[in-house]
Image (spheres, rainbow, N blue to C red):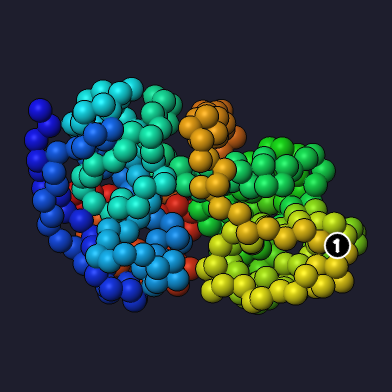
Amino acid sequence: MPQAASTGAIVLHEHGGPNVLKWEQQDLPSPGRGQVQLRHTAIGINFIDVYDRTGLYPGKLPAIPGREAAGVVVAIGPKASGFRIGQRVAYFSAPGAYCEMRNIDVDKLVKLPTAVTDDQAAAVMLKGLTAHYLLRRTYRVSRGDFVVVHAAAGGAGSLITQWGRSLGARIIGIVGSEQKAVLARKQGCHRVLISGTDDIVEGVRDFTRGRMAHVVYDSVGKDTFMQSLDCLRARGMMVTFGNASGPPPPVAPAELQRRGSLFLTRPTLFDYVRERADLDAAARALFTQLRTRTLKVKIGQRYPLREASQAHRDLEARRTTGATLLIPGG
C-alpha cells in the first residue's frame, strides 16, 4: 500500500512579483485512483509560470506553480496501469510542478526513452511540444518558407528555429541583444535582427527581397504585435502564442484585411494534445528530433528549487538564455 510522505514545495499565496514565491514543507498523501507518486529530478520553468504568478492567468490560491517536470515513479495508486516503480517519466500539462514530490494522474505522463535525459525532458517537454504544434499543425512549415521567430535565443524560440530549419525553412530570428544574436545564429537562424537596434520590418523585407514572411511566431506580445503583422506577406499567418511584454492590443479585423487578408491565431498547446493519441504522437516526434540531434537542447541555467524567485527575476529581466531548470534538493 502506498505510504503518505512529505515534500518541500514553492507555494503561491497571493499574486505579485517573484517575492511571493515561498518555500514550504507540505504533507503529501498516498497517490489516489489513477495516480502515481513522483520524485522530481528536474523541473522546467516557462513564461506561463510568470503569468500564473502575476495573476495574468488567474487561478485558485494557494497553489504550487509550474507545469513541467521529469521524475521517477516511487509509488503507484489504485487503477494506475501502464507504469512501474522506478520508471522515468515526464509531463508538461499538470499545474503544481515546483515541488520535490507530487501525485499526478497517469494520463498526464509520458514515458521517457533511454536516449532522453531527465534534464532534457524537463527543459523540452512544454517548449518542444509547442514547437511541434506550431510548425507542423498551426501552420505547416514547408521548404522555402520565410519564418520569423521572436525571442529566437530563448527556450521555445531556439527549438522552433532548429526544427524549422530542419524542415527547409529560412529563419529570421528576432533577439534582444548582440549576445543573444550570436546564440541565435549558432542555433540555425539565417538572419538575426536585434530589437531596439535594427528596423525589424525593413530587415525582413531585405532578407526576403520584398516578399515578406509566410508566418510569424510571436511570444513577446504587446511590444511586437503590430510590427509582426507588418512583417507578413499577403495571406500570411500571425501566430501569437505568448505575452512576455504583456497582452497584445485589441486588433480590428479590418487591420488584417488592410495588410493583405492576413490570418491571425492565438493557439495553445493543450488544445492540440487533448486526446492521448495526439499527445503520444507529438511526444514521439519530439523524442525522434532529440535522438537524431536535430534538436539540441541548451540548458542555460539551473537553480535550486528553493531559489525559484531568483529564477523568475532573471527570466523576466531577459537575463536567461535557452532553457531554465529548477533542481530539487539543491
- Decide which of 216, 103 is in the foreground and name it: 103
Name the image quarter holding the N terminus. top left
**Residue at 72% in and 60% down:** 264
Horizontal and vertical percent position of residue 244 = 52, 68
The quarter holding residue 235 reads: bottom right
Horizontal and vertical percent position of residue 330 = 20, 52
- Amino acid type for the residue under numbered disc 1: Ser
Horizontal and vertical percent position of residue 299 = 43, 49
Residue 205 shown left or right of residue 79 in the figure: right
User: In this orientation, does residue 275 appear?
Assistant: yes
Neighbour class for label 1 at 10 Å: few (<14), some, many (≥20)? some
Residue at the limit of the structure toward the right, as seen here = 210
Residue 268 shown left or right of residue 103 in the figure: right
* Above-or-below relation of 227 to 28: below
Residue assigned mark 1: 261
User: In this orientation, does residue 303 appear?
Assistant: no
**Residue at 13% in and 55% down:** 26
Residue 148 shown left or right of residue 309 in the figure: right
Horizontal and vertical percent position of residue 263 = 77, 58
- Decide which of 129, 203 is in the foreground and name it: 129
